[in-house]
Image: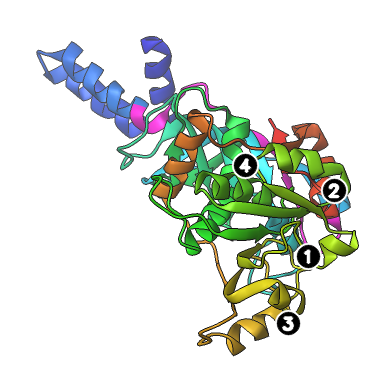
Amino acid sequence: MALQIAIYTLRTQPQVASMICSRAFFSSSIQESTQATLAQEVKIMGDPARPETMRAVQYSGYGGGAAALKYVEIPVPSLKKDEVLIKVEAASINPADCNIQKGLLRPFVPRFPFIPVSDVAGEIVEVGAAVSEFKVGDRVVSKLIFWKAGGLAEYVAASESVTVALPAGVSTVDAAGLPVAGLTALQAVRAIGTKFDGTGSGSNILITAGSGGIGTYAVQLAKLGNHNVTATCGARNLELVADMGADEVLDYKTPEGAALKNNSGKKYDYIVNTTNAGKWSAFKPALSSHGRVVDLAPNLANFVASMLTLFSKKKKLSTVLLSLGMEDLRFLLELVKEGKLKTVVDSRHPFDKAADAWEKSMSGHATGKVIVEM
């Protein structure tokens, strides 16, 4: 192995090789100096057998859906000093990924050609010179910067600041689902005053689209916070959402579900809305006198309502926008490790079938998370 590293250094790092040779010629402690130099180079280089190219999925313009995704062979990313190179094992597709392709942030994002998907988990195969928290071989999950993304590829460069180590026993599939959906759910549930240390008093809350990517996490987290949870979903997922802990599940296509009425007839202290089909006009009658809607997917009407009710002392609607926090992600991973939280997986797709995964996510009817495995 040492010989392989030395040969690799000679071929690809001539300045380092020259330094090693100089030390060998002039130093009486040749063995110690060479070993120290090679050890430092291993930190920077990672695996000497690192491939030069990789497969990736990208698109070159707005629109087109799954049909616009193309497989390409491109160079493996080079690292900045504060980045790690992850050999991707699992990537999670979020609705936001598809919305970017549709032109949600046109004309600013993305730059074409673009490799989508920001939630990835896998193994570190290389670390930058300034990386201190991780080493080659560590299993991690990362929330990539959305305007760069790059997750639908065999390898991706990720900043150390947006990367978290996986606890023992947590799979890369479970971890890959957490960054966007899990963090959004956690921040929404915290926004209604939820505590997870057993000291909080539960409220009567409603979670819309409880079988979706965010909803499945939100239902579980709300129950961990001792809330009385009602959730809406389609008929086929009623049992699944109940199994996640919801006290009552409403079929949103029934009259009762459409009116958001639970069996007790109680109004909701909070409504956590995870679907852009939810409307303030429907939420307002279901709220208690000082109830609040936490909207994670605001449409235009709800955005206007959030402005109009901003200073209301009674019923109001407010939006929650994801702010990435590594401590929050560590908290979620610990809950998964302890068996208190699980990633509900709609489907797992091999890398060669990434277009199928994209199509499923775009349908808007995924139950939980859509995962691509490398």
What span is in magenta?
43-65
- Determine the residue positioned at 31% across, 30% down: 16
What kind of residue is marked 3? Answer: Ala
Q: How far apart are marks 1 and 3 (CA)?
A: 21 Å
Label 3: which residue? 301
Depth check, mark 1 against mark 3: the one in front is 3
- Label 1 crowding class (10 Å Cα cut-off): few <14, some 14-19, many 20+? some
Determine which of the numbered discs, if any, sits on residue 102 in the image: 1
Q: How far apart are marks 4 and 2 (CA)?
A: 17 Å
x and y, in percent, of residue 354 in the image: 79, 40
Q: Sequence order check: which comes first, mark 4 or mark 2?
A: 4
What kind of residue is marked 2? Answer: Glu
Q: Sequence order check: which comes first, mark 3 or mark 2?
A: 3
Q: Sequence order check: which comes first, mark 1 or mark 2?
A: 1
Q: Is residue 254 visible?
A: yes
Q: Sequence order check: which comes first, mark 3 or mark 4?
A: 4
Label 2: which residue? 359
x and y, in percent, of residue 310 in the image: 54, 85
Q: Sequence order check: which comes first, mark 4 or mark 1?
A: 1
- Residue 212 falls within the magenta-colored stretch: no
Q: Is residue 71 above or below residue 362?
A: above
x and y, in percent, of residue 91 in the image: 65, 39
Q: How far apart are marks 4 and 1 (CA)?
A: 22 Å
Q: Can residue 116 be seen in this view?
A: no
Quadrant of res 251: bottom right
Determine which of the numbered discs, if any, sits on residue 19 in the image: none
Depth check, mark 3 against mark 4: the one in front is 3
